[in-house]
Image (cartoon, coloured by chain):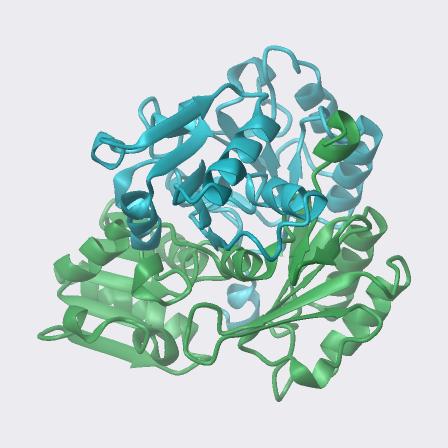
Chain colours: A green, B cyan
């Protein structure tokens, strides 16, 4: 049995009981080093723990599948939700390649995604239609990412940007903001949340015109408002339209 | 103190401990009838429970704010995540209108959103960039919804459709699918998840060309794949590109 679980943001107070139960029941826990470190130690004691580096996704998934096939009850962890830029998709791809559908029982346990955690700390920026785009061009052609940014901005979606910037990918965020500025006002609120509900949490709001890209790193998520998004009382929120309709 | 919390899909196994603690600590619990019914009875005993009908969002938020201002520790519940088509935004709008920033302490507790719950049951359809659109035109002009659907489809986003169809809004989904069909293949997988992790749960996969709109209701969420999304082993998933890059 293989369970692919989401840890949520990382704090135990936001870990679903189903995910905690899966960790409890597992004989082996597999995950990216940084995510395994988020798991309370009590879940790890006496277990086989396999934690690997950032680019070893395929190795990690293969190892988890091999362990589960050998009869070891195994949990593969993602942070946030395993189905949003997490490990669930790769596991299914590998199961398909190796024709494992009949041989391996798989359960996916959803978690609180990084976008929901970031939004809660900012206020309520995702209250209207939104688009989620990863700025990592390691696996996706940059041209496609640009096309998606332009399309979503032109149609006035709120945008949640994953993997906005890293040491090796340092120019993409600036380019992305320039694309957004072709359609959105420079006064559009932008929320930057780093390490949501984790040690080192930082929440900031800037505008599209003033955002300093150097303040954003790979542990951050960036949320860019739509034309209605505003800030008040230190909160960033996108009205859904009740006010216009019902004169709140 | 007002806490706006997400119940997640509804099952207690997916309710975050922070949300459970908020329910425990509250003297009053306010919410839409159908969502209050999802809360385990043990949380409700001995409390003031205010549950109202579907279109009474503003009344509900006002009542929750009034209770909290009167010194009653209050929780306002949303299903899923309160920041995704939930109650968090309206609370902030009302706090702004009444200039309550200094007088009312607000905490938003995120939850597992319906889109993540639906995706986990389907497989991993949201593994690549996706757009989230509500088909309800009660508060949003239908023209804007059409524009967003067209833009997201042309840029090959995966789409998660909220509020796809109700008794009163019975033509929007058909129209939306027709817009998607202008850009996407009729063979594109479409997942329909009704009552995820609740009584009456139903999970189905169709294609964009074959989907029967009559099978979709207001308790469903619809996820439409991108050009890479496929089905195998009864699962719907969107590859992220590892296979092309690393020849998995």
Question: A100 or B146, which lies in front?
Answer: B146
Tell me if residue A63 comes above or below residue A169 in the rendering: above
Question: B31 or A155, which lies in front?
Answer: B31
Left or right: residue B52 compared with residue B210: left
| Residue A100 in sight in this render | no
Which residue is farthest top? B167
What x and y, as percent, mark residue B167? 59, 11
Give the tally of numbered discs.
Answer: 0
Tell me if residue A112 comes above or below residue A198 in the rendering: above
Question: A66 or B215, which lies in front?
Answer: B215
Asked where in the image residue A7 lies, by quadrant, the reply is bottom left
Q: Residue at x 49, y 59 (%)?
A: A117
What x and y, as percent, mark residue A206? 74, 71
Left or right: residue A100 compared with residue B152: left
Q: Residue at x 28, y 49 (%)?
A: A106
What x and y, as percent, mark residue B156? 71, 49
Which residue is farthest right? A182
Which residue is farthest front? B70
What x and y, as percent, mark residue A204? 64, 72
| Residue A62 in sight in this render | yes
Task: Report the quarter where the C terminus of chain A lies.
Answer: top right
Question: B34 or A19, which lies in front?
Answer: B34
Left or right: residue A76 compared with residue B70: left
Tell me if residue B185 comes above or below residue A167 in the rendering: above
Q: Residue at x 53, y 19 (%)?
A: B217
Q: Residue at x 47, y 40 (%)?
A: B114
């Amino acid at each position: 049995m293989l369970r692919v679980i989401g840890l949520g943001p990382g704090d135990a107070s936001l870990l679903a009981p189903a995910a905690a139960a899966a960790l409890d029941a597992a004989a082996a826990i597999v995950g990216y080093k940084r995510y395994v470190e988020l798991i309370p130690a009590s879940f790890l004691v006496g277990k086989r723990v396999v934690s690997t580096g950032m680019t070893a996704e395929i190795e990690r998934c293969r190892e988890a599948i091999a362990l589960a096939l050998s009869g070891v009850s195994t949990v593969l962890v993602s942070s946030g939700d395993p189905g949003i830029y997490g490990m669930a998709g790769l596991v299914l791809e590998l199961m398909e390649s190796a024709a494992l559908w009949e041989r391996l029982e798989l359960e996916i346990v959803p978690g609180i995604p990084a976008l929901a955690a970031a939004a809660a700390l900012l206020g309520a920026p995702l209250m209207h239609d939104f688009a989620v785009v990863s700025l990592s061009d390691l696996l996706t052609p940059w041209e496609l990412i640009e096309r998606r940014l332009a399309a979503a901005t032109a149609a006035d979606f709120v945008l949640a940007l994953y993997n906005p910037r890293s040491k090796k990918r340092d120019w993409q965020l600036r380019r992305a903001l320039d694309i957004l500025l072709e359609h959105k006002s420079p006064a559009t609120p932008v929320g930057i949340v780093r390490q949501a509900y984790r040690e080192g949490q930082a929440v900031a709001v800037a505008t599209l015109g003033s955002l300093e890209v150097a303040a954003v790193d790979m542990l951050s998520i960036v949320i860019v408002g739509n034309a209605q998004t505003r800030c008040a009382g230190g909160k960033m929120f996108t009205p859904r339209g009740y006010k216009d309709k019902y004169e709140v």
